Amino acid sequence: MKSEAESVASQGTLPPGPTLYLVATPIGNLEDITLRALRVMKEVDLVACEDTRQTQKLLNHYGITTRTISYHEHNEMTRAAELIVDLEQGTRMALVTDAGMPGISDPGFRLISLAIRHHVPVVPIPGASAFLAGLVASGLPSDSFRFSGFLPAKRGQRRDALENIKSSPRTQVFYEAPHRVTETLEDIVDILGAQRHVVIAREVTKLHEEFLRGYAGDVLNTLKSRAEIKGEITLLIGKADESSQKPAAPRITVRQRVGQIMSEEKLDEKGALKKIAKEMGISKSEAYRELQRSK
């Protein structure tokens, strides 16, 4: 005898009662969606979307007429509470983002955590993920890796993040904006070395899908030869070679650098701080605070 749950599943209909379904959507090619994801989006009462216009293209493509509502980083604080009220009143809801899995460098965490706190069932509907697709096709070791979302936009913070993985024994995976990727590769060459293996996975599953694989220095030269870089980018950095897994040399402090610049370039402290701020990609006030802390 089949259980009631098995019977419901075999009929292809969702069970009654409030449930939050986390539905993965295509990262490019609209065919990269599961049959289960399509069924869930057809049968739920509401689809919460990062961008209703973007999701509507997907729904229209598959003839899905379920009502949509916006749920994005700018309204997440208030909208999450509103959606919890709907769920507690019995709504079956799908949460989707523009591409990939909700909550992975996209809105979703606040609603998911609230749903769990309010004892609303949360059901993942697996599917496409840009960083996983990039990882498995990169050619870099995938037995041990770390995904860290986007690298910091500010150069000083980004360089600190790269310093922290200089001796990493695992593949590092990041998302990166196309207008920053060349500058990021310059930092990688400077900090991790021109011989570090990297992969740029660009526009994965889309018409202009591209993988740039090789040494960081060579990939950087390829990027510099292009007038413009467009598209969604996953950046993968290979693990450190044994020869590079030596303790890093102590990083020069702001105070030490101020002394160097004042001595070598005959600048006063204010002028030296201005130059250091530019070098490190931080504000002058931040450089000043760092100087004061080291005194």
Image: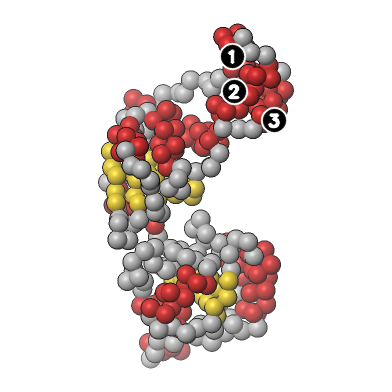
Q: Quadrant of residue 235?
A: top left
Q: Which mark is residue 261?
A: 1
Residue marked by disc 2: 275
Residue 133 placement (x, y as % from top left): 34, 56
Please report the residue visible at 64 percent of the width from the left and 65 percent of the height from the top. 75
Mark 3 is surrounded, within 10 Å at the Cα level, by few (under 14), some (14 to 19) or many (20 or more) other residues, namely: few
Q: CA distance from mark 2 to mark 1?
A: 8 Å
Is residue 198 visible in the rendered image? The answer is no
Residue at (65, 69) in percent of width and height = 79
Pointers 2 and 1 in contact (CB under 8 A)? yes
Specify which label sits upstream in the sequence, 2 or 1. Answer: 1
Residue at numbered disc 3: 285
Measured in 3D between alpha carbons, the distance from the residue under mark 3 to the one under mark 1, in whole angstroms, is 18 Å
Q: Which kind of residue does numbered mark 3 sit on?
A: Ser
Lower position in the chain sequence, tag 2 or tag 3: 2
Q: Which residue is at the front of the view, 117 or 35?
A: 35
Q: Quadrant of the N terminus?
A: bottom left
